[in-house]
Amino acid sequence: MAYRETEKMRNRKAEARKRIIECTYGCVADGGFRSAQITRIAACAGVATGTIYRHFESKEDLFAEIFRIATQREVDKVAEALAAEDNAVSRLEVALRQFAERALRGPVMAWSLIAEPVDPKVEEERLKFRRAYAQLFEQAIRDGIKEGCLPDQDARQSSTCLVGAIAESLVGPLSPAQADTTEQAETNDHDPLVNSIICFCMQGLTGTRR
Amino acid sequence: MAYRETEKMRNRKAEARKRIIECTYGCVADGGFRSAQITRIAACAGVATGTIYRHFESKEDLFAEIFRIATQREVDKVAEALAAEDNAVSRLEVALRQFAERALRGPVMAWSLIAEPVDPKVEEERLKFRRAYAQLFEQAIRDGIKEGCLPDQDARQSSTCLVGAIAESLVGPLSPAQADTTEQAETNDHDPLVNSIICFCMQGLTGTRR
């Protein structure tokens, strides 16, 4: 008799998968990918470690999935900010500021998404998602050039400059090494930091002193 | 009788290590880290694969060493350009332009150093070297503020924006995927690309339209 998956079994599998994802997400948000050991995830999700490998071919695949889920959330936030009713320069500024502020409010997860050395599968995802961010910015820059609020420029190149500038300038402030030594994390006063990143980015786009 | 390494043995070991490094470097320059298989390196260097592991604990350690050697060369070039006798704005522009042009002239190696998904050990090195680039730029920005040719700004944050902008904007043009579809690689006319990256970076620093 052929093996048939009952609906109840399908539901249980789906629930286990959901718990594995939630627990991994929680581990990464708490201590980065390096703290997300399979045994710890299994204990949290209440499954055997073998069960995890029935849902994900490898730890790398599970990590890549978590990366996609968490990063897509940030991409959606940027898309949302860029879709507001305002001129392109304002929309770009709001989107960049929001990205930086969200990262600094959740520094462990943001560091893991932006810079934590993980493995090639996560690196592949990073490249894809940076392209996704850049495409959103590119469209807004094109809008700005058409609206006349941005000078003519290679929108594609400028969009990648934006993505690089904002990501790289957050690496230091987000890094666990720095978090221990700076008071900034305690006071939560990220304004000067965010302002100087936004200033560089907007000057780069507009060529106008801020 | 205690084992004693003769000078001849030491020389032979040093030569083998040198050949292993040269061959790995050649492989990476030719087809990225992914093309640098241990068997290929061993054949090229004329050693047994086991010999490679006597010199480097793992392939990851060998790759990290190649990364350090190749990237230090670029860091030195940037340092050289920034040490020229000129005002800080010109020095920064020359250094950034040279960095981009050198990358586009050796796109396979540059892609491997900047963006190829490799492994966590190489990622660790990337973080360190990006810090090294940023520190060089930071000093030049401080000089520029003192000289009065740059407006007051957070030199540290601007330096990381520069590093991110130039690296990220080169990822697309350098990527093997794009090299196949664009004519740019064939014509070698990188001027518009380099100009738009430099324009964004210098505007970001100076707040002046170029």
Image (cartoon, coloured by chain):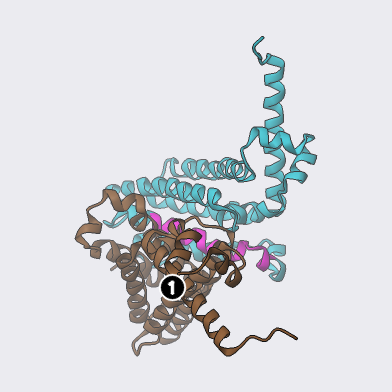
Chain colours: A cyan, B brown
Residue B96 x %, y %: 36, 73
At horizontal 78% and vertical 40% (from top left) the residue drawn is A44
At horizontal 32% and vertical 72% (from top left) the residue drawn is B97
The quarter of the rendered structure image containing the C terminus of chain B is: bottom left
Q: Is residue B81 left or right of residue B58?
A: left
Q: Main secondary structure of the magenta part?
A: helix
Q: Does residue A203 appear in this view?
A: no
Badge 1 amino acid: Glu
Residue placed most toward the observer, B199 or A108: A108
Classify A152 as above or below B144.
Answer: above
Residue A128 x %, y %: 46, 47
The quadrant in which residue A132 appears is top left
Q: Is residue B149 left or right of residue A55?
A: left
In this view, which residue lies farthest toward the front? B1
Classify B162 as above or below B168.
Answer: below
At horizontal 49% and vertical 53% (from top left) the residue drawn is A96
Residue placed most toward the observer, B98 or B164: B98
Residue B124 x %, y %: 58, 65
Which residue lies under the disc numbered 1?
Answer: B22
A163 in the magenta segment? yes
The quadrant in which residue A202 appears is bottom left
For mark 1, give the secondary structure: helix
Q: Mark 1, chain letter?
A: B
User: Which stretch appears magenta?
Assistant: A160-179
